[in-house]
Amino acid sequence: MTSALRRKAAEMASAAQCFSSYSSSPATWALRQRGGARVLQLSSRRSFCVSAAAGGFDNQNREYVIVGGGNAAGYAARTFVEHGMADGRLCIVSKEPVPPYERPALTKGYLFPLDKKPARLPGFHTCVGSGGQRQTAEWYKENGIEVLYEDPVVAFDGKTQTLKTSSGKILKYGSLIISTGCEASRLPEKIGGKLPGVHYIRDVADADSLVSSLGSAKKVLVIGGGYIGMEVAAAACGWNLDTTIVFPEDHIMPRLFTPSLAKKYEDLYQQNGVKFIKGALIDKLEAGSDGRVSSAVLKDGSVVEADTVIVGIGAKPVVGPFEAVGVNPEVGGIEVDSLFRTSVPGIFAIGDVAAFPLKMYNRIARVEHVDHARKSAHHCVETLLTSQTKAYDYLPYFYSRVFEYEGSSRKVWWQFYGDNVGETVEVGNFDPKVATFWIDSDSRLKGVFLESGTSEEFSLLPQLAKSQPIVDKSKLQAGASVEDALEIARSSLQSGASV
């Protein structure tokens, strides 16, 4: 079918759907309390859509518009295609110059030295990270999806259902999906946060700039001991660079790792030449005679020399210009219900920017992770295009893979599922395996962490975290190996004592 015929068919289908929507009763919304958190409910499906034949706007595809070009947008596009609802109907508005890609690669394989097979586009466009098709720019064209590159949305009018981009384009939408993600938290400019040689990683351009610096760097300073910091530091080891990590906490990965678990990874990094400065804050970054960053001054007055600085101090959700849709005051982000619907009919939010009900733990959460980006996108589009009313029931999942470049003496790959609350039991000597189990006061397994597991062992983790079985802590502690401990946990699933 030619492009013109596809568009004509889409216009006819869109017009018919609009008639059907207008003939039904309008959607009604209610706000109720659950576990102290506000939860939005919608009594019927969206009641407004826009015909692709409508004129006077700068986008040809107007029935569905996704704002944002990250992971979630790519997976949402795939779901539209799977339902046959993308061609001539879907528009993606992105600030990036390329189609959506698997963002985790930017702090992993993308930073490998050039002689150690680094990852590069188009190799990691969505949806290859989950075993799906590589969605290049040609894929979007072939599927009739309109993509506006390097033109972020800067204004939003819910009454007229229009968007304005940075270039001045006015876009119309029938249903809107907000997929704006997060932006890196930055050091203030007045303390050197914008000096040449100071890097933040959020997109390919950021990663390219860092790779360029690493190629000529001698001393690298990583600010922050979380995901970004640890992954970038591991990559710097592949370049054989003098690398220091500075952070204010007592150990790395404080939001997940126990002190004992953290020490094992710190020892590994130190064996690779990485130095740690713990319990320290940055006072300012200073420039050398060439204007480029040359050192960091800590709050205690000590100085750390560095010609390349990477700042990994967290991220914040990009809610603008959609604040009027409803921002959750506790966790930030656009507040949605369990089907990713906002307080405004026809507007949804997915991925990092969505503040959603975390059903299994009965709280509102915002999850900055590729797994949630993928799953929330699929769930949202299924809701939009079908009669699905099943609540999103997400199991928190995190992972990291580092030291995977050619020539590395030890590759690291860990996974965590569940909630890191309660007492912990650690099993294993990190040679190469170690496991940590989180157990609450009712002896229920709440979370589980595993390093260097087999595929079968890793597949057990979500079963355990989802079922939350009652486990015998003393038996876990007495386990002679990680394999023994996992088998003990597995047997607790078979006992039937789970939620």
Image (cartoon, rainbow, N blue to C red):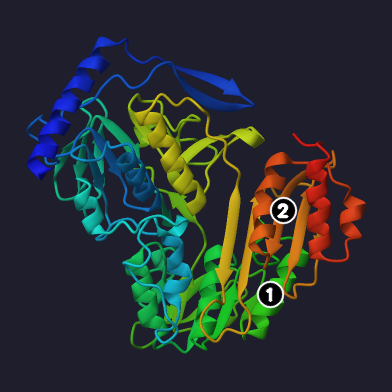
Please state which of residues 32 and 148 is positioned toward the viewer in this rendering: 148
Q: Residue furthest front?
A: 1
Task: Left or right? Give the position of 155 relative to 464.
Answer: left
Quadrant of the rendered image containing residue 407: bottom right
Query: Which mark is in front, 1 or 2?
Result: 2
On the image, which quarter does residue 292 sit in? bottom left
Residue 370 versus residue 409 in the image, above or below: above
**Vertical side of 377 occupied by 257: above or below:** below
Q: x and y percent of residue 177 in the render?
A: 34, 37
Q: Earlier in the sequence, mark 1 or mark 2?
A: 1
Q: Residues within 10 Å of mark 2 (few under 14, many from 20)?
A: many
Query: Which residue appears at 38% of the width and 82% of the height?
Result: 213
Which amino acid, by three-letter code, is at mark 1?
Answer: Glu
Q: Quadrant of the N terminus?
A: top left
Q: Callout 2, which amino acid?
A: Val
Q: Quadrant of the C terminus?
A: top right
Badge 1: how crowded within 10 Å, few (<14), some, or many (20+)? some
Q: Residue at x 40, y 33 (%)?
A: 382
Question: Can residue 494 be seen here?
Answer: yes
Between 343 and 7, the residue placed more toward the observer is: 7
Question: Element at badge 1?
Answer: helix
Residue 322, position in %: x, y? 34, 37
Mark 2 highlights which residue?
448
Task: Find disc 1 in the rendering and name its residue.
Answer: 266
Q: Is residue 475 above or below residue 119?
A: above
* Residue 188 falls left or right of residue 144: right
Taking the spot 10% from the left edge, 33% from the top edge, the residue there is: 8
Position in image of residue 295 (x %, y %): 48, 82
What mark, if any, has residue 136 been given in the picture? none
Q: Does the image show residue 255?
A: no
In front here: 139 or 235? 139
